[in-house]
Amino acid sequence: MARPRAFDEDQVLTSAMHAFRHGGYARLTIADLERATGLRASSIYNAYGDKAGLFTRALRHYVDTFVGPRLEVHAGYGARLEDLEQLFWSILEPPYDDGGGCLVTNSAAEFGAGSMAAPAVRAAIETVERHVAEVLQRELGSAAEAPTLALLYQGLLVLSRAGLTDDRHRQAVREQFARLRAAREGATT
């Protein structure tokens, strides 16, 4: 009979996701993950198989506990353009502007297509675009702008990770959403 785990898996996965978010997959060693999670290497291997197994679980945990809930708040059922705009602002303001970026976006950049991360990355990015499209359809009567907004969102995440966001990017968000609000007003008159 297998021994029950003597650690809080949510806490371990949260710690691992932040370690991967800040350090990337390739750069982190098992020793780094031991420090981040509080687990010994043997526990990491027993529970997750290897570093890749821990990463895959941490990425899924990130999508389930961070990305999904944020999308529900800012782009879920009943969300308005103003809610969606707050999703964009959240990238540019504390605590999400900490230089760690988004684990999904970071993984897309680090691994590319055909990697262990590709299915989760693809699903998360498609989910973001679907939520954006639903808000736009509801608010404007058309989701035609969804790919553009999703691209802006992903681009901001990349720039945030690199510590390169500035007032120009804030202005771009302001202008994009001012244009969308104007389109909404035009659609209702």
Image (cartoon, helix red, strand yellow):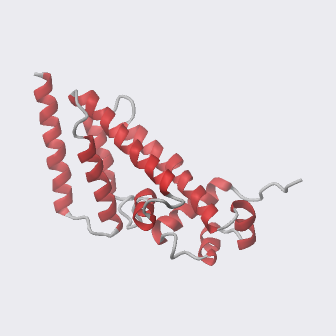
Lateral position of residue 129 relative to residue 34, left or right: left
In depth, the one of 124 and 12 nearer the eye is: 124
Q: Residue furthest top?
A: 189
Could you say where residue 34 lies in the image, as x and y percent from the top left? Answer: 65, 72
In depth, the one of 146 and 15 nearer the eye is: 146
Q: Residue 93, can we see it?
A: no
Lateral position of residue 85 relative to residue 57, left or right: left
Q: Does residue 31 sit above or below 73 in this rendering? A: below
What residue lies at 71% left-to-right and 72% top-to-bottom? 41
**Callout count:** 0
Q: Residue furthest front?
A: 114
Quarter occupied by the C terminus: top left
What residue lies at 46% left-to-right and 65% top-to-bottom? 111
Q: Residue 158, can we see it?
A: yes
What residue lies at 23% left-to-right and 30% top-to-bottom? 142
Could you say where residue 136 lies in the image, as x and y percent from the top left? Answer: 26, 34
Could you say where residue 44 lies in the image, as x and y percent from the top left? Answer: 70, 66
Could you say where residue 16 lies in the image, as x and y percent from the top left? Answer: 57, 63
Lateral position of residue 153 relative to residue 33, left or right: left
Q: Residue furthest right?
A: 1
Lateral position of residue 180 relative to residue 48, left or right: left
